[in-house]
């Protein structure tokens, strides 16, 4: 038997995690909604594509969640895909000399649960570890809204080149997709406080056991079917039509005009500006200020080999060009380079050769194997950059247009650009429409 739906109706522009989360939040209140996605697949940046040569469903870039990502975990549980994520209670750190240190929690309460793993890290000296302990204490005591430049703050709190490059950068460049030189203190602090200092399992990485595109497959569609959510792929929106302080309709590229009681945009910030008329953008600072958000790229390099080449599920790389190596299948590795501006001027073949040479140095099995297929994928605007004081440019989910709510990890969620931030933004956007939808 179907659900008794509210008479109100909401159109959601964008089928990434923010849009999917908004749909789940609205449908949970029995509000009918339609997701309009311009691509032929859901998931946005956290999605997959079919590789024409291997036939595999390939993640454009490996996304992971952490134990502190409670909203994303609840989203997955709600729609029935939680079992497709596999927690990693141990993180494996490797240096160019092939030495590996395991990083996992013991039975002590937070924040002492990781002290033994830090103590055993082979790539840090005893003096470095003491410096890091001091820095972590100072970070814990810093004000949550202090967003001054990070590197000078680290220097003032006794961090040296070794601790900055071999500890703080290792964690933060991957978590925030930005270099230490550009980061602000606020979200660096949030990463460490939420993931390492307050919750014994906050640091645990969960990796999808299936391609990201599979996360938005049958289970999610069944949930949508049961809760009155319609999904239209290949439905590109060309214009959000505004009169006064309300959206009157949206125009699709195929010529259709659609109307609803409420609207949610779940698209990148530059795309939202393009969907609104220049007059509307200029009228409202919330939209005009989006031009001040900077973006940062992520490059992933995919290798298929003729034999298994790595036994560990993942490796975090220290003093290397790549940052993470994920074993997606025994013969298929994905290497992720976050904040990949240094690769911008290189061609795909040069990037592939550099990363392959690095893998050969790290793993003898790779040096002995034959590369069957390789592919380089760069998302040039993968995330917004959490620069110092970035929150002044991030709008709330309640927009100045009465029946329009904003979703996206770039909105004001209190989180950096993560799957967690995207999910939270969708829920908050649905809440912003509550006066219209009940």
Image (cartoon, grey):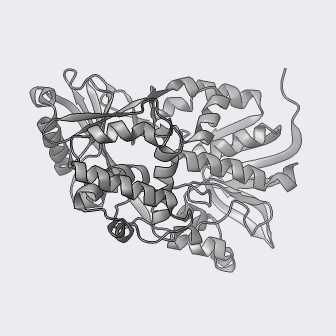
Horizontal side, residue 59 vs residue 361: left or right: right
Relative to 157, 375 lies left or right: left
Residues 385 and 94: in front is: 94
Relative height, residue 164 to residue 198 (above, below): below
Q: Percent x, y for residue 123?
A: 21, 44
Of residues 375 and 392, which is closer to you in this image?
392
The reply to whether residue 208 is visible in this rendering is no
Image-quadrant location for residue 56: top left
Q: Residue at x 45, y 67 (%)?
A: 387
Q: Position of residue 93 (x, y in %)?
A: 27, 38
Task: Specify the quadrant that holds the N terminus.
Answer: top right
- 365 or 110: nearer the viewer: 110
Give the x, y percent position of residue 269. Answer: 56, 62
Total residue callouts:
0
- Describe residue 288's horizontal placement relative to residue 52 as left or right: right
Q: Which residue corresponds to the image point at 64% horizontal and 48% vertical from the top-left?
A: 424
Left or right relative to 409: residue 402 = right
Q: In this picture, is 209 found above or below 95? A: above
Residue, x 53% and y 45% (percent of image)?
198
Percent position (x, y) of residue 33?
76, 43
The answer, for residue 149, to whether it is visible in the render is yes
């Amino acid at each position: 038997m179907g659900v008794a739906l509210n008479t109100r109706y909401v159109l959601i522009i964008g089928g990434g995690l923010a849009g999917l989360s908004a749909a789940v939040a609205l449908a949970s209140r029995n509000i009918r909604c339609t997701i309009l996605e311009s691509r032929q697949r859901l998931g946005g940046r956290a999605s997959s594509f079919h590789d024409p040569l291997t036939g595999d469903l390939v993640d454009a870039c490996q996304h992971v969640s952490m134990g502190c990502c409670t909203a994303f975990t609840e989203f997955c549980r709600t729609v029935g895909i939680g079992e497709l994520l596999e927690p990693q209670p141990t993180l494996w750190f490797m240096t160019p000399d092939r030495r590996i240190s395991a990083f996992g929690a013991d039975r002590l309460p937070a924040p002492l649960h990781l002290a033994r793993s830090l103590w055993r890290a082979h790539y840090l000296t005893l003096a470095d570890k003491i410096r890091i302990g001091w820095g972590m204490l100072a970070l814990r005591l810093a004000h949550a809204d202090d967003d001054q430049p990070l590197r000078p703050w680290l220097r003032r709190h006794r961090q040296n080149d070794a601790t900055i490059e071999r500890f703080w950068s290792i964690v933060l460049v991957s978590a925030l997709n930005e270099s230490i030189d550009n980061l602000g203190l606020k979200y660096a602090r949030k990463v460490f406080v939420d993931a390492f200092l307050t919750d014994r399992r906050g640091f645990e990485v969960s990796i999808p056991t299936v391609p990201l595109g599979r996360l938005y497959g049958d289970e999610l569609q069944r949930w949508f079917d049961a809760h009155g959510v319609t999904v239209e792929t290949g439905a590109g929106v060309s214009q959000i039509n505004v009169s006064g302080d309300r959206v009157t309709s949206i125009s699709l590229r195929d010529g259709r005009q659609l109307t609803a009681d409420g609207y949610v945009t779940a698209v990148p910030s530059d795309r939202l500006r393009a969907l609104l008329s220049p007059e509307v953008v200029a009228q409202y600072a919330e939209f005009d200020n989006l031009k001040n958000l900077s973006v940062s790229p992520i490059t992933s390099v995919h290798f298929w080999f003729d034999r298994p080449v790595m036994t560990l599920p993942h490796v975090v790389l220290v003093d290397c060009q790549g940052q993470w190596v994920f074993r997606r299948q025994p013969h298929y590795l994905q290497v992720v380079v976050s904040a990949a501006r240094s690769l911008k001027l290189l061609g795909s073949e040069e990037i592939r050769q550099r990363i392959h040479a690095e893998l050969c140095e790290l793993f003898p099995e790779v040096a002995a194997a034959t590369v069957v297929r390789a592919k380089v994928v760069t998302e040039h605007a993968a995330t917004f950059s959490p620069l110092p004081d970035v929150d002044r440019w991030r709008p709330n989910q309640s927009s100045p247009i009465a029946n329009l709510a904003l979703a996206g990890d770039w909105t004001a969620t209190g989180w950096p650009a993560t799957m967690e931030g995207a999910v939270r933004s969708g829920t908050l956007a649905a809440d912003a429409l509550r006066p219209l939808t009940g």
